[in-house]
Image (spheres, rainbow, N blue to C red):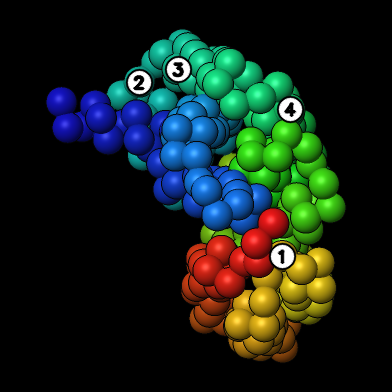
Amino acid sequence: MTSVVNDYLILTKVRITALVLVTTAAGFLLASSARLDPALLAWTLLGTGLAAGGAAALNQFLEREADARMRRTAGRPIPAGRMTPARGLTVGVALSVVGVAILVAFVNLLTGFLALATVLLYVGVYTPLKRMTPLNTIIGAIPGAIPPVMGWTAVTGEAGLPAWVLFAILFLWQLPHFLAIAWIFRDDYRLGGFPMLPVIDPDGEATGRQVALYCAALVPVSLIPTFLGLAGPIYFFGALVLGLAFLGAGLMMAVRRRGKEARRVLLASVTYLPLLLALLVADRAPI
């Protein structure tokens, strides 16, 4: 029973889904006034989590043959033979449909539409593009940046400028994060037939340069919430320190382009985002 549950957790990429929920909750809390609606938050997170898990399952259904060729993913339930492709497809469709339906019924139509758009972009655009172009990372960052917008729209019913600032922060953060992962596992991606930038950039010069550029762009963008009146000085200086530290790791990777530096970027990225969101929520200004 435990192994079956574990397979479903792997199929729905529970760690990535958890990150989606964290960013959604951050958008929700930032948009909320002093009076929080816990029921609305619960419905928002439930619908978003189901849709995200469904998209992950559909992604693994479509990439099952490539996953079987890569050491990092060969143990997933479908390529390993512990789950049939039909079961993975059924789970993915069911979770996606139920998640979107919950958001439409109990949150609002706009948030449900954004969830549907996220699933379609992730499964129907990003997933096939992974086999075609190294630009897939940029395309994949779009659905990955929508969840905080969904959190905002769940409360306000509209996607205003603050929601798109959250989108921009998440969009830029994902690029050095995933490029570092792709550099670490570039041999695996080559075996899987995915032309990620590190696969076609053997010396890592372009990869390192892009990591540093995206980290640099993230610094000023992350400060915009303060200028919009969404957060105070504590967030501003905290975001500045976090952004410069992240940029420092990115610059080191651009200069040395080794696995050690890529792992530092990865560590910096997974440290940066939760701390930034925590500061943003803790120092948010009343709406």
Whole-number angstrom distance, CA of label 1 to CA of label 2: 46 Å
| Marked residue nearer the N-terminal end (1 or 4) | 4
Disc 3 residue type?
Val
Question: What is the x, y in percent for residue 231?
Answer: 68, 70
Of the residues under marks 3 and 2, which one precedes in the sequence? 2
What number is the disc on residue 110?
4
Residue under label 1: 230
Q: Position of residue 80 (x, y in %)?
A: 36, 30
Q: Position of residue 267 (x, y in %)?
A: 50, 73
Q: Nearer the viewer, residue 228 or 263?
A: 228
Residue lying at the far left in this picture: please name it: 1
Q: Report the front residue among 71 and 104.
A: 104
- Cα distance between the residues tagged 3 and 4: 24 Å
Indicate whether 130 appears above or below 81: below
Disc 1 to disc 3, C-alpha distance: 39 Å
Q: Any mark on residue 206, and which? A: none
Quadrant in which the N terminus is drawn? top left
Q: Is residue 233 above or below residue 10?
A: below
Q: Give how far across and how far down residue 3 sits, in percent.
A: 20, 32
Crowding at dot 1, Cα within 10 Å, few <14 / some 14-19 / many 20+, comes out as: some
Neighbor class of circle 3 (other Cα within 10 Å; few <14, some 14-19, many 20+) is: many
Of badges 3 and 2, nearer the viewer stands 3
For the residues labelled 1 and 4, the Cα–Cα distance comes to 22 Å
Answer whether labels 1 and 3 touch (C-beta < 8 Å): no
Q: Secondary structure at mark 3?
A: helix
Residue 252 seen in render: no
Q: Is residue 71 above or below residue 110?
A: below
Residue 91: which disc?
3
Could you tell me the amino acid type at mark 2? Met
Dot in front, 1 or 2: 1
What residue lies at 78% left-to-right and 37% top-to-bottom?
A: 158
